[in-house]
Each structure stands twice: as structure tokens, then as C-alpha cells.
Amino acid sequence: MSEKLIKILKEKGPIKKIGVIGMGYVGIPAAALFADAPCFDHVLGFQRASSSSGYKIDMLNKGESPLKGEEPGLEDLLQKVVKAGKFTCTSDFSRISELDAVTLAIQTPFEDPKSLLPDFTALIEGIRNVGKHLRKGMLVVLESTITPGTTVGMAREILEEESGLVAGEDFALAHAPERVMVGRLLQNIREHDRIVGGIDDVCTQRAVELYTPVLTKGKVIPMTATAAEVTKTAENTFRDLQIAAANQLALYCEAMGINVYDVRAGIASLKGEGITRAILYPGAGVGGHCLTKDTYHLERGVTLGVEPLDYPENAESIYVLARRVNDFMPKHMFNLTVKALERIGKTPKGIKIAMLGWAFLNDSDDARNPPSEPYRDMALEAGCEINVHDPHVVHYPGIDIHANIDEVLTGADVVVILTGHKQYFGLTPEQIKQKMGSKQPVIIDGRNVVDPDKFINAGFVYKGIGRGDKNSHSLK
């Protein structure tokens, strides 16, 4: 414990001015909630004035949310804190020097999962910007999901190199990973427990001071910085593992000619003391920024550990195997498409496919690493013509996405449902078949959206994830 840092923080007093670097799904709601807390005076949101995302600055300063999809309460809260003069978005990183605390919410993708190499380019740039303007007594918190050991290692080294100050003596350093899901950002930040890990006890307590005011139901759980890093990567890895278990079960049920949703309901029905049945739902694939790469952060943390790993010889990590299963599901969707076409004597070449859903998450615009993309790539390589519909995703690099579903359905041979948007649950076989204009149309359901019997009776060739009871139905 550093007596020097304790003295500096005592002289500095309570946290009043906060900066949030990264105006995305994590940074925007966090900044708004900090700004709404009465104990904080002002919050600065930092966003690069780039050609791809600089537009966010003007929108946020008008109290408008650049995030699309359903995000309850966010725009109202932004308008409130902007009108009150408590939140400003800027591209001037020199203003970091004005702050008492700064958080970094920057994406950390993986450059090469096979060699466990993360792409920390954007995060390093953000850390360097903080280091250049760091002042004594400031608190720096990494909210990005990172390889265990990054806070006490790379982040600390860069901050000390750029500032000439010493972490734990001149400034506080901690990791407090975000735990949010698109569609309920504000609710998650307020109600989920907050993991907070400093590089020492003094840093941890300063970070606890930062996050406590924005929590309602949630509580702060203090630990070390590395334990906090492992907590975040492990909780996402476990969720990915659970999804992979459901997906593998779906593939088994297809092979055995039974309905995975019947099996799932049966498993989930067993309740009682000491019984835990956390069975999730199968689907067309796992997307997003977190689950698709956090397993690799956890795996890399082991390679950087202080002790050699004791594990069954030549055995593959069950976490990496789970990633492979989930990455396979778009391929399985394409395999189902091919098999459905074979049933009516067709091949993929020249087939028109209407893809319903580009976002990876229902009723959101989050299109980071969507399973729809590898499906589309496989279909194009096989000679298919693709049209994509999504009610929430407006732009995606290199992809034309239509807002009008009728335009996408018209003339299609195959409809493929990749996202469970609410709009798709209301589609009827008569409505779709009329637009398609095909005597024997095909529908592939990757999210259990449609009633198989209704579509089969209307003359569709149906195949769905986990629907072994229907995938070999008689043709009408």
C-alpha cells in the first residue's frame, strides 16, 4: 500500500470530473450515467473525429444517440445530461488533463486466434493518449475486455512511459470490465454487480468510489486487477461454452430425428435443491464483439501465467472446442440450405436467397462479427444471389442491406432466417410465398422463428436448427 498515493488522493479530494474514452455501446451509456450522478460535476466523452465515427460527436452533443435498435431510456438520459450541461463529447484528448478519473472502453479484437495474438492497436493508442495528459492523483480504469495480466503489464508500462509517473504511487490504475448487453445497456450498468480490480488496495478503493454512485441494485465486488480480467473473460467463455453445448445438442437431435426444443424443455424442467440446469438455446451462430474472442484472451492469459499449465496431455481446450462448434453453425445453416435444395432437385448455383437479419442480436443494430457474414460468403462462393434485410442495421462495410422486406423476399427461391428480430415472428407462409413467387419455396430457420407445420402445409421445404422431427418432412 502506497502512503504517497493515499496522501495525493486525500489532497485531491473526491472524484468530480470524469472522462470516458470510446463512444460506443459501452462508453455512451457509461458516460451518461456518470453525468447523471449528482456527486459528479461533469463528464467528457472522447471520440476520434474520424471519417467513420466522427459524426457521433455532434449527435451526442445534441443529446442524440448514435446507437440504433431498441435501447430503452438512453436517448432520454443523454438529452437530460446534455441539457443540464453535465456531458460533452470532444475529440480534444488534451482535455484529459482536466479530469480526476478516466475510463477506457475501446474494442479489443483478436488479430489471430490460432497464435493467440490480440489486436490492441486501438487500446494502446487510447492508453498513450491518457499517458500523455496524465496528472498526479488521477484514476485510470480499463473497461475493455483484455488478456489477463494486461493492466499490471502493458497498460501500466505505457502509462508510466508516457507520463513519467508511477502507477500506485502517483496515480491509481484499475480494471473494471463492462458487463452489458445491447438492448439493455443502462439497466445492465445499474443493476449488474460491478467487478473492480486495482493494482493495489488503494487503487481498488478509488475505483470503487467511481462506480458506486451509478449502481442501483448492483454492488461492487473488489478484487485484484488480474482476477477482474479473468472474471470477465471467463464469464463470456462460459456463456460461449453453454451455447456450444446447446448447438451440439441441436446437431445431435437433427441426426436422431427429434426436436431439440422438446429435449431442452425436458432438461430445464428438472428443478430442486442442488440442481442447476443452465441450458441455453441453439441457433445459427454466435456473433458480437465479446463471445467471439474472449476465449482467446483467457487462453492467452494462461500462456503468460506464472506457473505452467497442468492439463491432460494433448487434449484440446474445451473452451476453444466450444468456439469451433459455434463458429461452425453458419456452415451448418448453409449445409441445411444445400440439403433443402437437393430435395427439390436444385443446386445453390443461381439460386436467389433472401437473408433475414444481419445483426447478431435480435432487435438491435449490433452487427459486430455476425454469423450472417460467413453464411453470405459461403452462399456467394457457391454461386447464389443474395439480398439482405435488417430493420435495424443501416450500414455495414461492403454489404447492401435493405430496409424493405418485400424487396428482399420478391423473387427469392430461399428464405434464410439468421436473426430473431420481432418483425420476423409475424411473417406468414402465405405472405412470404406470394412475394417469392415459387411453387416450392425453401425456408431455413436458424432461430426457431416460424411454425414448421404451417410452412410445410403451405408447400415450403423446411429445415431448421435442431428440428430433426421436421427436417425430413414429406413434400407437398
Image (spheres, rainbow, N blue to C red):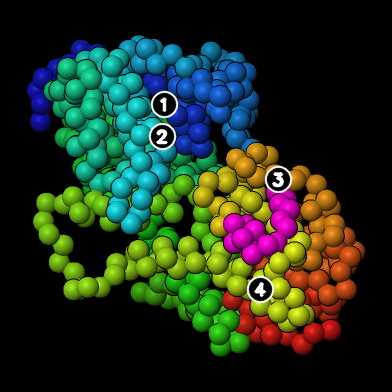
Residue 387, above or below 38: below
- In the image, taking residue 221 as reference, residue 47 lies left or right, namely right
- Estimate the x, y position of residue 294 in percent, counting from the top left: 37, 52
Q: Secondary structure at mark 3?
A: strand
Question: Which mark is in front, 3 or 4?
Answer: 4
Kind of residue at badge 3: Ile
**Pair 2/4: label in front:** 4
**Viewer-nearest of labels 1 and 4?**
4
Indicate the amino acid at tag 4: Val
Q: Which mark is residue 106?
A: 2
Q: Is residue 10 in view? A: no
Residue 36 x, y percent position in the rendering: 50, 24
What residue is drawn where x is 75% and y is 46%?
402
Rendering quarter of residue 129: top left
Secondary structure beneath label 4? helix
Do the CB atoms of the residues marked 3 and 1 lie less than 8 Å apart? no
Work out which quarter of the rendered image holds the N terminus and state it: top left
Residue that numbered label 4 is attached to: 338
Measured as percent of width and height from the top left, residue 34 is found at 44, 26
Q: Which mark is residue 21?
A: 1
Which callout, 3 or 1, points to the residue nearer the camera? 3
* Badge 4: residue crowd in 10 Å (few <14, some 14–19, many ≥20): some
Distance Cα–Cα, label 3 vs label 4: 23 Å
Q: Tell me which amino acid carries mark 1.
A: Ile
Relative to 107, say whether 352 is above or below: below
Which stretch did the figure color magenta?
376-392
The residue under label 3 is 401
